[in-house]
Amino acid sequence: MSNLKLSDRVNKVKPSFTLEMTSRAAELRSKGVDVINLSVGEPDFNTPEHIIQAGKDAMDEGFTKYTAGSGMLELREAICEKLLRENSLKFSPDQVLVSNGEKQSLYNACQALFNKGDEVIIFSPYWVSFPEFVRLSDAEPVIVSTDPKSQFEPNFDELLSKINSKTKGMIINSPSNPTGGVWSNNAINKILEISEENNLIVISDECYENLVFDAKYVSTEKLNSYNAEVITCMSLSKTYAMTGWRIGYAVGKHKIIKAMSKLQGQATSCANSIGQKAAIAALTGDQKCVNEMREKYKGRRDLMIQLLNQIKNVDCVVPGGAFYAFPDFSHYLGKNNNGQIINDSFKLCDYILDAAKVVTVPGDGFGAPGHIRFSYAVSKDTIRSGIDRVVIALNDLN
């Protein structure tokens, strides 16, 4: 069928360049190239043993069939207990939807809430999938800038200027991918107040909630004294090093969760049964593993920020959470690489990969020209070696 035409929906969606960078690293390694990957967006730790064992037990016990579309009742009860214990939030199991990773929860929310002609506020730098989720719901993303010097909190004057009769909601992400920024309670309160005043729904991506280093994390919904409409999306992937298990969840008002569940039921039926059993063990088991991983990330963060800020003409604020640094490399734009002008962060990251064999992620793809995302979900030795290589490569530019 040579004249096959793909849908307009597919053609308007951009591919995930973060996955592309990971694929490039894997391809080079397969060819024997000594590549250091500082682009990784997942923990380098293995899933804790008691969680793995729960997955093995599920298979041995024949728990390999479909579950309820919204997730096992036992898991949804465990999620409610976790929310009450850790976040001081009270939800019932019928307000919980378990999905194939939090990414599906976010997608479900956009599909359930937005229509053609709607506008949705997204704050830059943004996770690459946010604008695409909005476009796939036939709505339009509207980008609002943030301030790097205050954990990338919103420019509220700009936000207010971009809200109009078409604005339906906002997507927020704290701690942030790609910046690691953690918004203050004051900033979240302003978001909630503006949302309530303008009848907007807030989709709060909180997948890095347990990777906050310098303060106690407070969920958006916990601050919601304004009675704004909030859908909270959380994940086990980053907290328990379970990215491949694909278990995430959303909580919110029953009407919205029911709508999201209906969509998911026609798309993927349910999250995988083995992963759900493992998730119960993760949420109800000893949380010592979470604290240990967080402390290791904090030490790596401190090292990476120190080394990045020692690079000439590079500025990197200290991120409050997640496992990313997001330094400003604008000084190196316009530099010459053997006759080729490096005019954006895509070309700069390509140069760093070619010259230093270090994989990083260009900030332009996150809506932040001149920046580069570095991951410290790697060992300290890898961080040192990677930054050393980057410095040597930058010194060779004219």
Image: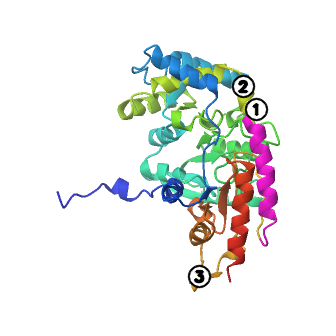
Q: Which residue is mark 2?
A: 287
Q: Which residue is mark 3?
A: 341
Q: Which mark is residue 187?
A: none
The quarter holding residue 10 reads bottom left
The residue positioned 70% from the left and 43% from the top of the image is 193
The answer, for residue 277, to whether it is visible in the render is no
Q: Which residue is mark 1?
A: 291
Q: Earlier in the sequence, mark 3 or mark 2?
A: 2
Tag 3: Cα neighbours inside 10 Å, few (<14), some, or many (≥20)?
some
Asked whether the beta carbons under mark 2 and mark 1 sit within 8 Å of each other, the answer is yes
Residue type at tag 1: Asn
The residue positioned 55% from the left and 61% from the top of the image is 33
The residue positioned 48% from the left and 48% from the top of the image is 133
- Give coordinates of residue 102: x percent, y percent: 54, 37
Residue 306 falls inside the magenta stretch: yes
- Residue range of the region highlighted in magenta in the rendering: 293-313
